[in-house]
Image: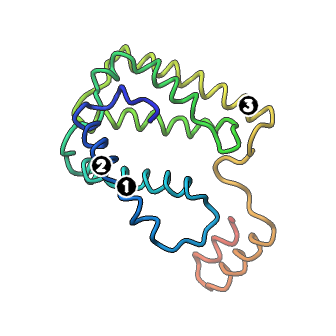
Amino acid sequence: DNMPHFLNDEFRRVLQREDGQIDYDAFFRKKYRGKKTPEERKVDFRKQTLAKACKAILKDLSQTPTMETVDLEAVSNNVADSFFQYLCARKKKGGGLMMASCYSGYRSGLTFLFKRYGRTIPADLNDEISDLMKGVKRIANKARQAGEGAMHEGARGLTWELYLFFQKKFLELGTKEGIFAAAYA
């Protein structure tokens, strides 16, 4: 829905055909006791149905997809601007910026997209994306330092209770390794 101009035409037609064949009546006949409104349930069901269609086309990561899903030529011609727009739209549920490492994951996804279809990102485009990512990470880190979002990243220290628990378990082992672990933990 966000950038349909990057979809391969054949893939778009398959999704449109699948979208037109969704049987909402059968879906709504099922009992439901949750808190979602019928409209929210309908949207979720549509997403699930289209995701299944995409999965059938993309297959397992070790297999070749049955068709190209993305028009890589269109992406290549416009990737930096579109990728930047995409990154700017990615926010936490509360609307804040994500951690810098999350944005790196999106870049990995873009790289994998090209690799999956046997293409390489042109060097000048890769340089442009690298510069873009440096800026995005800098902004995300500044936002974190200013107090926006959670301040936890990576490994966190153990609580004293958990530390004592591990010490006890290491010593209960009664082995050289257990004693070594207790001494250097």
What residue sits 48% from the left and 22% below the top? Answer: 130
Name the foreground residue: 171 vs 47: 47
Count of numbered tags: 3
Which quadrant of the figure contains the N terminus? top left
Residue 169: where, in percent of width, then height? 67, 81
Which residue lies under the disc numbered 1?
49
Q: Write down the quadrant of residue 13 in the picture.
A: top left
Q: Assess disc 1: are there few (<14), some (14-19) or many (≥20) residues with their C-alpha within 10 Å of its C-alpha.
A: some
- Marks 2 and 1 sit apart, C-alpha to C-alpha, by 8 Å
Counting residues from the N terminus, which is met first, the one under dot 1 or under dot 3? 1
Q: Amino acid at mark 1?
A: Thr
Residue 133: where, in percent of width, then height? 53, 25
- Marks 3 and 2 sit apart, C-alpha to C-alpha, by 41 Å
Counting residues from the N terminus, which is met first, the one under dot 2 or under dot 1? 2
Which residue lies under the disc numbered 2?
18
Name the foreground residue: 19 vs 115: 19
| Contact check, label 2 and label 1, Cβ < 8 Å | yes
Name the foreground residue: 154 vs 50: 50
Which residue lies under the disc numbered 3?
143
What residue sits 56% from the left and 58% below the top? Answer: 38
State left or right for residue 19 relative to residue 149.
left
